[in-house]
Image (spheres, rainbow, N blue to C red):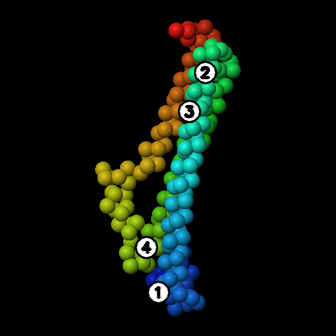
Amino acid sequence: MVGGESDNSLSQFTGETYKGSFNADLLEQYKLYVQSAENVSARRVASSRYRLTLNVALVALYGLQSANFGQTYWTLLVPVLGIPVSLLWHQIIKSHRDLNAVKFRIIHEMERHLPTALFQYEWQLAGEGKGRSYNPVTYIERWIPIAFVTLHLSATVLTVLTIVGLMNWAV
């Protein structure tokens, strides 16, 4: 319970049963929790930056291998490695999105006990991610690894067709 109101499991105490400065501690926990949600977003961005760099490097390596050595079984290794890297990237984006969704549900619940509910209000104004005014970044961002999977699959198919002699890769 928070301040005498019934909460399923968010708070263990009321203002009366808490041994300390209940409102100050609640606000401090809120600040720390908002920061933890921001940290998840920062980790997602760093992870995506790393996987984007890795995928671009794999595409460049594929191009160099193809240009210098032609289509060989070794050339096939690069896009085949790129597919799981991209699929993993997609899963990591989804995982971060799901974790932040839970964090923001908790933040919205905590805001019920604060003077204003800024994040809840912002989310309402944004159409809860379903309106025209806001499209969550992770919904857009998740298409980048899918594009790389498509690129790596295309490179794999082209390489196999060239190796078996059904296509001439040389220009």
Residue placed at 55% from the left, 39% from the top? Answer: 52
Residue 77 percent location from the top left of the image:
67, 25
Q: Quadrant of residue 111?
A: bottom left
Q: Give the CA distance from mark 3 to mark 2.
A: 12 Å
Mark 4 packing: few (<14 Cα in 10 Å), some, or many (20+)? some
Q: Residue type at mark 4?
A: Glu
- Residue bearing mark 4: 111
> If you read the primary sequence from the N terminus, does the residue marked by circle 4 or circle 2 appear first?
2
Q: Is residue 127 left or right of residue 81?
A: left
Give amino acid for label 3. Val
Q: Is residue 73 left or right of residue 20?
A: right
Neighbour class for label 1 at 10 Å: few (<14), some, many (≥20)? few
Amino acid carrying label 2: it is: Leu
Q: Amino acid at mark 1?
A: Gly
Indicate which label's residue lies in the foreground, 1 or 3. Answer: 3
Q: Is residue 62 above or below residue 102?
A: above
Residue picked out by circle 3: 56
Q: Secondary structure at mark 1?
A: loop
Label 3–label 4 contact, CB within 8 A: no
* Disc marking residue 64: 2
Q: CA distance from mark 2 to mark 1?
A: 67 Å
Q: Nearer the viewer, mark 3 or mark 4?
A: 3
Q: Distance from label 4 to label 2 (Cα)? A: 54 Å
- Rendered position, 7 above or below 126: below
